[in-house]
Image: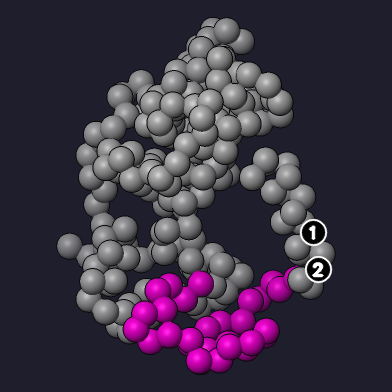
Amino acid sequence: MTADRPTRDEHFPGYDVLDRAKTWDPVTAGVVLSRLGPTAPVRFFSVEEEAACRPLLERLLDLGDDGPPIFESVDARLGENETDGWHYDDLPDDGTAWKQSLAALDHDAETRHACRFAELDAHDQRSLLESVRADDDTWQDLPAAHVWNLWMRYACAAFYSHPAAWNEIGFGGPAYPVGYQNLGLGKREHWEVAEADAHDPEPWARRIERARRRHGV
């Protein structure tokens, strides 16, 4: 079986991080390439929770149907109890908090639209999620800001662990054992590709900061 190669991003035309796989040690290559193979069966979330979680992650990351397997990554991580090693004292452990927050999403959708979260169109899903993000208090008996942080931490960790995301940002993947030689601002390794749609770093940084504040991360 041949693993699908990650999508190449227009910002770095011609770049594919998998071209670097031959420089990785066998263990590292095995870990990375396994993220491109068939996904494991769902084992942490119930059928109802999966139905809510998939569109939640799609809306959080603005992904389409051809995005990386973010849901599967989150499910596998929670199934192995691979947490960040801490949780907010006003939230239960991460697995329980995920299940409670997904149930709360469905409850909100039922209250507002008389249907489950997965049955809403994308606009109404975004509207409901925005109300959670903007809530400075308690949402469905849960601290809204901490629930939002939980969702975003897991979503972003899953997305940026996938080679498709590395192609999007021009990341070279694991540095071991080759490492980087051309250290310094604006310097590139011989295998790196210049960004086709580069931005001046100061206004770009401002845009990123605005997006960070808007999403509460």
Q: Please say if the residues under marks 1 and 2 sit with CB atoms less than 8 Å apart.
A: yes
User: In the image, residue 133 lies at what x, y percent?
Assistant: 66, 31
Quadrant of residue 52 in the image?
top left
Q: Position of residue 26 (x, y in %)?
A: 22, 76
SS assignment at label 1 = helix
Kindly identify the residue that appears in the image at 41 percent across and 34 percent down.
Answer: 94
Q: Specify the label residue 52 is tagged with.
A: none
Task: Write down the residue under mark 2.
Answer: 202
Which residue shows up at 30% across the image and 40% down it? Answer: 81
The residue located at (41%, 45%) in the rendering is 85
For mark 1, what is the residue?
206
User: Where is residue 117 shown, x and y percent of the image?
Assistant: 50, 21
Identified at 61% across, 18% down, the residue is 139
Q: Is residue 205 above or below residue 172?
A: above
Amino acid residing under circle 2: Glu
Q: Which of 76 and 36 is in front in this view?
A: 76
Residue 121 vertical placement versus 11 (above, below): above
- Judged from the image, the secondary structure of the residue bearing numbered disc 2 is helix
The magenta span reads 171-199
Please tell me which residue lies in front, 208 or 123: 208
Above or below: residue 194 compared with residue 129:
below
